[in-house]
Amino acid sequence: GPPPPIQAIRDYYGEEVAFYFAWMHHMTEWYVIPGLLGLAVYILRIHRGETVDNCELIPFFGLITFCWAVTCNRYWERREAELAYKWGTFALTDADRRSLGVWHTFRGKMRRSPITGRMEKYYPARKRHLKSAVGIIISLFLLAIVGVFLVISMNVQGYISRADEEMWGEGEHPLYFPYFAQMAEEGGIFDAKTWKCFLPIIFRAIIVTKINQQYSHIAEKLAEWENHESAMGHKKSVVLNRVLFEAFDAYIILFYLAIYERDVNLLRLELAGAFHIDSLRRILTECVLPYALPYVAKYFEKDAVGPSKKDDDPKKKLTTCGHLTAEADLEKYERFDDFIEMLIQFGYVTLFASAYPLAAFIAIGANLIEMRTDFWKLGHLFRRVTPSREIDIGMWKWATKSFAWFAAISNLIIFAFTSSQLRQWLPDYYVTDERSGQSVPKASSRHEILLLVLIIEHCLLIIAALLNKAIPRTPQSIRIKVQQRLWFHETLAANARIRTAKRTSADATSMSEVATQMTTIERLAHLNSKVKE
């Protein structure tokens, strides 16, 4: 589709919203590469009668996806630099950004600044750090509660079953709860072998969404309690806490299936279910429902026409009519929701590429739909966003870069230990477990396989470092323009210093001439007085 009108969005909504749409467009375009490759791998796998567990092509796709993710993030940084320079925010330092927005709830004692000598509010950094540590403990406690819920969800979905309990032998499986696990057994409420297995995923998605909404208020309260001086510091605290919380919700079950259960088929089933339901939820909540709600509201407004006509109070008419009043009644736009959806989607595509190669291909369609629905909801469902000057997308960029680097490890775990993909290349290093039927490394080959994985992982990290070194963060054209601007400013400053020096010299010369003239006048006056005597 056509690119979004980034400049028009920036002029109306500000840099932050414009950066979001530019980022979404950039990611959608870059998803084409792994999307087409994943589709080709899927077609070849089906044609050859292979599964994700034993397809020998998928490991290469996972490694290519890692290199793609690193390159994609690097080119986004270049795009950010171009937009920031165009919008006049490229040269903003952290100090400049802090000065642009002081957080309105900042509290502190008045003191005289040791730098400027002016009176200012001051709050000790050590107190803020202590409060941040307490906030981390609170977040970990809440994550533990969510973890218990997710463990119950895994029992209900059949990921933890009686078979896992039997594999432990005399010991008890620490995460096995018979009451919930029996619901996923044959004939149960959520029979794992029928379509009913998707019901717990849907219920979990709804409940987790509600939990995340509640935690958003907690994260906001924690950030206010930490008492950040700048709006940038407050925003970073909120984003960091919420990203960790929502990433935990989205990925913890997937990592459990990949590392602990080591069942790539269950991993693929869970990943596909979570990814598809999340994409469907985004389309429903941001496309179908927003489009249908105005018609529902008009239907109920017709029923209210009679009573409203009888009400002739002019004050009520003033308060209920008018374009400004209607906009003021709209909801506030929550930027975080849109950013976190893109981040979680990026994690599905990169972290588990070796388990679900079609994720990028599906993400392209989901993003094309959501991009247009986001335009519509900004113009019809939310109040106009207060513009804020930004140099980039902030913490979201660092989160995507972290996901990209961690993708090397997660895909290698799936490649070597979760599936039989490495066994297709090194069949002598693996055996089939009699109880689970899964491929497991031989006792004599475990160290060799681990060494091979570490070598590949280090090679991938070196390749990523070389890619970042070879691709500059800032385009050369922007660097030249910045250097030209610096040279121009230095030239102006040098010329100003020269003019000041000349003016000072001229003033000194004139003062010397005046002194000489005064001395001559005094001498003449003295001689005149002598003559009169």
Image: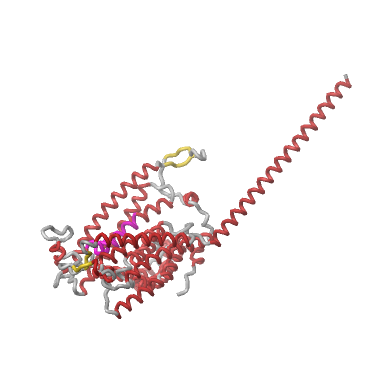
Nearest the eye: 169 or 360 = 169
Q: Which residue lies furthest to the top in this view?
A: 533
Residue 495: x and y, percent?
Answer: 67, 49
Q: Quadrant of residue 198?
A: bottom left
Left or right placement of residue 37 versus residue 504 in this view: left
Residue placed at 36% from the left, 55% from the top?
A: 240
Q: Residue furthest right?
A: 531
Residue 135 is at least partly visible in this image? yes
Q: In which quarter of the image is residue 362?
A: bottom left
Left or right placement of residue 176 versus residue 286 in this view: left
Nearest the eye: 270 or 73 = 73
Residue placed at 15% from the left, 59% from the top?
A: 173
Nearest the eye: 315 or 80 = 80
Q: Is residue 521 above or below residue 497?
A: above
Left or right placement of residue 496 versus residue 295 in this view: right
Locate the C terminus and report the quarter of the image it occupies: top right
Residue 20: x and y, percent?
Answer: 43, 63
Left or right placement of residue 95 versus residue 339 in this view: right
Residue 253 painted magenta: yes
Q: Main secondary structure of the magenta part?
A: helix
Residue 163: x and y, percent?
Answer: 14, 66
Residue 104: x and y, percent?
Answer: 43, 49
Residue 525 painted magenta: no
Residue 303 is at least partly visible in this image? no
Colouring chosen for the image of the structure: secondary structure
Q: Quadrant of residue 447?
A: bottom left
Bounds of the magenta span?
241-260
Locate the N terminus and report the quarter of the image it occupies: bottom left
Nearest the eye: 288 or 502 = 502
Count all numbered tags in the image, as a single digit.
0
